[in-house]
Amino acid sequence: METVKIGIIGVGGIGSAHLNCIASGKISGMELAAVCDIDEKRLEYARSVCPGLPCFSDYREMIKSGLIDSALVSVPHPLHAETACEALSKGLNVLVEKPEDITVGRARALNETAKKSGKVFGIMFNQRTNPLYARAREIVSSGGIGELKRTVWVITNWYRTQSYYDSGGWRATWSGEGGGVLLNQAPHNLDLWQWICGKPCEITAFCDEGKWHNIDVEDDVTIFARYKNGATGVFITSTGELPGTNRLEISGSRGSVVIERGRLTYKKLRTDEREVCTGCKESWPQAEYDEEIYEPKSAGKAHAGILQNFADAVLRGGELLAPGYEGINELEISNAAYLSSWTGKSVSLPMSMEDEGEFERRLFERQKRESTKKPPESAQQTHKTYSERWEVRF
């Protein structure tokens, strides 16, 4: 195989951005071979960009057409696993948009299908391409800050207006998106949080629904986390704060890493704090440390970087930066956060089958209550390039 012949399933906001990126030849070794959408207007747009491009209204027909060997899944969140499973089971490689789906159970089923298929399976965690987060992961995983003590991420610059939420009937609904800020904006940050620091073993959360907007889902969240070694963490996110903040701080026995305003500051203690605590005769000694300031010139290749990485994996067996199997990790944190908020109890990770079932039951109840509402007309946006709102912002 010399070229990845990819088909896009879902040509909405992000799907149209992927379409333009691939069609413009920005991804080496990848060709846009077909698209699919249930909305004829979206297909008309695809034809206007790529005259003669095969278009389908049923993704199963596109999968069976023989025109594609890979699929990019960018349909609504609750359809991610179902759609990706169909493509994988028919022998296609798959790149799925985030989140992997809306429940851990569906994500697990997708992972199992992918494993059986033996095909390349990736997820669009485009912020993993950012060199700041890659450097933070390198420092933490190599033991550069010693034993993890505390993680704090305040990511509140995901601001959205009421107009944004009113722009489509699927937005900010339990049925259409599966949740609010945790399922739409913050999956990237939840993924990076566990990618860099490891997955917590316990979650306690407060997910305030409709706190700043007229919506049924959460727009303000505070998560408290515990790790197996006793370390603690806090994750705060909101779509209701201006100007908002993006600050990640990771503390350990050998130092700390702070990412803010596009800069990483790494302070490495010359002596482990535990040794200082037990061995120093002074009551409040001055910390002796070496400092590294890292301010990369580029924010990374974002979505195009993940697409290129996926193409390289299919063509040459390269390692995926964001394997699809890892999508379940951030999703389990958000599922646990919802369940904790709904029940007022802490939730252990990995989630038990009982907790998974309880989460799904409560989610279904919320979806059922929404079914009596008449959603507004969808107002899908078209993006010729990747929107700034999808990138890392400081």
Image (cartoon, helix red, strand yellow):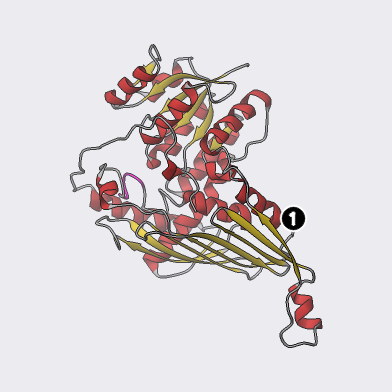
Q: Quadrant of residue 322?
A: top right
Tell me, yes or no, if residue 257 can be seen here. yes
Image location (x, y in percent) of residue 2: 62, 16
* Residue 243: image location, x then y, percent: 39, 59
Element type where label 1 sits in the image: loop
Residue 175 painted magenta: yes
Q: What stretch is highlighted in magenta?
A: 173-177
Residue 377: x, y in percent? 21, 38
Q: Which residue is tagged 1?
A: 142
Q: Which of 10 and 307 is in front in this view?
A: 307
Confirm whether residue 120 shows in the render: no
Look at the image and say whether residue 198 sits in the magenta stretch: no
Q: Identify which amino acid the numbered label 1 is placed on.
A: Ser
The secondary structure that dominates the magenta segment is loop
Q: In this view, does 107 lie above or below 309?
A: below
* Residue 316, placed above or below residue 193: above
Residue at the spot x=46%, y=56% of the render? 334
Locate residue 376, reporting x and y percent. Answer: 20, 42
